[in-house]
Image: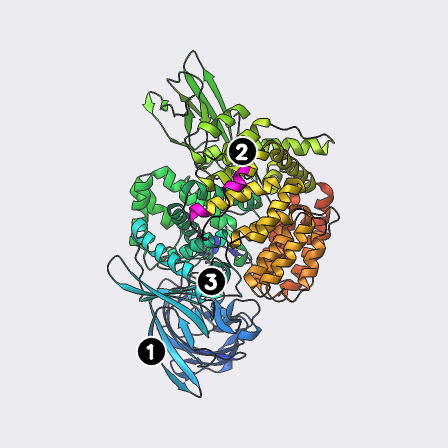
Amino acid sequence: RPVRLAEYRPSDFLIDAVHLDVSLDPEATRVTARLAIRPNPLGPENAALKLDGEDLNLVSAEIDGAPLRVDDLDVTPSSLTLPNPPRGPFELTLTTLVDPSANTRLMGLYRSNGAYCTQCEAEGFRRITYFLDRPDVLAVYTTRIEGPEAETPILLSNGNLVETGPAGDGRHFAVWHDPHPKPSYLFALVAGDLGVVEDAFVTMSGRRVALKVFVEHGKEDRAHHAMESIKASMRWDEETFGREYDLDVFMVVAVSYFNMGAMENKGLNVFNDKYVLASPETATDGDYANIEAIIAHEYFHNWTGNRITCRDWFQLCLKEGLTVFRDQEFTSDMRSRPVKRISDVRGLRSVQFAEDAGPLAHPVRPQIYHEINNFYTPTVYEKGAEVIRMLKTLIGPEAFRAGMDLYFDRHDGQACTIEQFIACFAEVSGHDMSQFLRWYDQAGTPEVDIRTAYDPDRKTFTIDATQKTPPTPGQQFKQAMVIPLALGLVDEDGSDIPLVVGGAHAGPVIALTAENTRIVFENVERRPVPSLFRNFSAPVKLRSDQTVEDLLFLARKDSDPFNRWQAVQTVALRGLVAGVAALREGREPTEEPRLAEAIGRAFDPAETDCAYAAQIAALPSEGDVAREIGEDVDPDAIHSARSYLKASLRQRLAEPLAAAFDRLAERGPYSPDAAAAGRRALKIAALDLLAAGGERSGVERAFDLYKTASNMTDRVMALQVLSLHATAEREEALEDFAQRYGTDPLLIDKWFLIQASAPLPDTLDRVQSLMASPLFDMKNPNRVRSLIGAFASGNPTQFNKADGRGYGFLADVVTELDATNPQVAARLLGAFRTWRSLEPQRRRLAESALQRLAALPRLSADVGDIVRRALAA
Ligand code: ARG
Ligand code: ZN
């Protein structure tokens, strides 16, 4: 049953060309596939041909024009086998019927608000026709789509449009040809009555590419930001990586029913509409930023994913980690580099470190899977991007670019492995990459412990670094990793002293390759303050002997903006952990007054980088504190300690907070640009503290901002601040928001999310009653994620209610949803990724909810896989 990397074999057959003929019908779409097949010269001699299939209704089959009889074929629910296919090239023609209207899994061909669309990654193409549905079978596709002109005036597929015309009976057709060989997971088809926004891009070699963004009619004015983002992405990829687009047209389609964020189908990206639609009236700053980043991500896949794809699904990080790295760099160039880095690291720690610390931990490149859909994870994506970043840090930007050039050059048109990718960088840099490859194969977050000593007589500063990676499921013993330590030794005035080791210049990046490393820096006149893992140079957990004084010094003086932020976070985190311990022992938390001073600087009128200041002002999350504590976690105590700290900051900083809130008030028309968004973020950070503990004046300010907001960011963020405290204003604003925006599903998602995330005792009851409202739709993944996903993964105190109701509720929802959309159901269960670190009572309750799921008679492969792994000891 499980698939293992070690058992990879090339396909016995290859498919060079695919001619698809799709005749659309709501319940019985007829798909005729003509496949040009030949035995793989690398394969065995007398192999049977076994094609993948799922939920298909086979109508007929022919080989080279001759009908096949049913007993020439072996058809099961998941396959079609020709026991004795021709031993040379042949054409197999298969006709199948599929039912798009009944397709609630949203994999394969389905309907979204009446439009037809497809999602084929990872294994959805087999729900359209029988096929060798694996990424190392690359074919040239020609697709003819036929449908009723009235309902489907727009007919789209991959590649270039070659022909259109009437097909009789009110129907019409379009033929698309994609000259670039591709795996089946990149196939796409869209048909419907859609609005379009058009533009063009002239590539670096002077070719004109038509750009089209398709949205529901009436939403065209919300597609312009996506269009601008496409052009910016195209330009950036040319300038930064020398990559040019390669078809006559690039299309993006927004659909409202979508399992994930978006999909990089060749020339025809399909998007969750949440990541396309934006207008000043309907979108927040966060929406604008997400759209820009996700448009870029999918566009960048054209080279990292499509032109060069994955040999097998174990290599998923080959395209995802690399493409996330590329979109991070894009955003860094478009906006603020330090702010992007800080928010990525926050995200990495909150989801990937959490995954690594629990029962679902797996390597960036897993070695075994039961259900590939469950491996589209923060580890594969975000840790995968960190691995690329470390590679660049270790070999330097020039060698990194040279390695990328070599990779594009050598492997264009191929389905590759991580080894082939890394070999390019080994070759251009001369580095031995064998130890580096462990980042792909060894799971878990390495823990690095750093102790320092200054010797005033010898004028040396010694760093002793120890690394250890804790055991993870299936990997008891870990080897030493190569860990890039970007380091500065900071002098009194904030300058870095020269790093001299053994008489030679060293650093600023030192590779820690052994379990224990000692580095002795020479010519050190006085004790410096070490700034460790600058710019988060490795995805590790750091323990160090840095004192609070050291950290507060770094917060002011370090030249590295990431570590200035990190220093404040570390001081806050240490305080919060101590606060939790105090509360659990029945004491009052004691506070560090200098923390208020450090955070207060964020609100100083002299601080001009507001987005950065907002990051300084944002305390570690409850999840951050839980991870730092690691075991016997009590979410209520964490929430109390954090609320306590916020209230004390409010008291200490009352004046600067109020002044900043007033100073940052919106003036003039809304612009989503990074600087304006930064001002709003800092204003909201001030508001959040002003309203800490439900303080009246803060709540009143929030209510006032809610009512007078001139843009969606202020309105939603004010509502979010109000939602944290049980007040009349809260209820009035929530009511008002529903009145104003009840007809806009994406805005209702925000309203759902805000209510589901509130740390209030009646939240679960609210979530349950909202599920019964006509605004909720269990078949729409966005609704499910914003109401139930936000509750389960974004509300530590209420999901982890001490009576276990939160767990039971999630188990019930997952049970129900599993019958229609197993992929989304399995994703919700991710909320259990940290259940083992809870205090005993909650742990028992979480375990019994999981066991209840495990005992169900019919569980999908997706949910079954997560439940089993979550429960495995
Ligand atoms: N390749 C897409 C992206 O990251 C994600 C598609 C995931 N699909 C899935 N069914 N798991 O850009
Ligand atoms: Zn991707």
Q: Which callout, 3 or 2, points at the residue further toward the start of the chain?
A: 3
Give the Cα separation between the discs numbered 2 and 1.
62 Å
Give me the disc on residue 271.
3
| Rendered residue at 31%/60% (across/down) | 245
Question: Which of the pair 404/797 is nearer the observer?
Answer: 797
Q: What is the secondary structure assignment of the residue under circle 1?
A: strand
Q: Which residues are magenta?
A: 659-676
**Classed neighbour count for the residue bearing mark 1: other residues with Cα under 10 Å, few (<14), some (14–19), many (≥20):** few
Amino acid type of the residue that numbered disc 2 sits on in the rendered structure: Ile
Q: Is residue 247 visible?
A: yes
Residue 664 included in the magenta stretch of the image: yes
Q: Secondary structure at mark 3?
A: strand
How far separated are the C-alphas under marks 3 and 2?
39 Å
Q: Amino acid at mark 1?
A: Glu
Residue matched to label 2: 599
| Near-viewer residue (508 or 762) | 762
Crowding around mark 3 (Cα neighbors within 10 Å: few <14, some 14 to 19, many 20+) is many
Tell which of 445 and 545 is nearer to you: 545
Q: From this viewpoint, which residue is outermost toward the top? A: 457
Residue 364 position (above or below residue 598): below
Q: Is residue 766 magenta?
A: no
Whether tag 2 and tag 1 are in contact, CB under 8 A, the answer is no
The amino acid type of the residue labelled 3 equals: Phe
332 is higher (above) or lower (below) than 736 = above
559 to the left or right of 715 = left
Q: Depth-wise, is mark 3 or mark 2 nearer the camera? A: 2
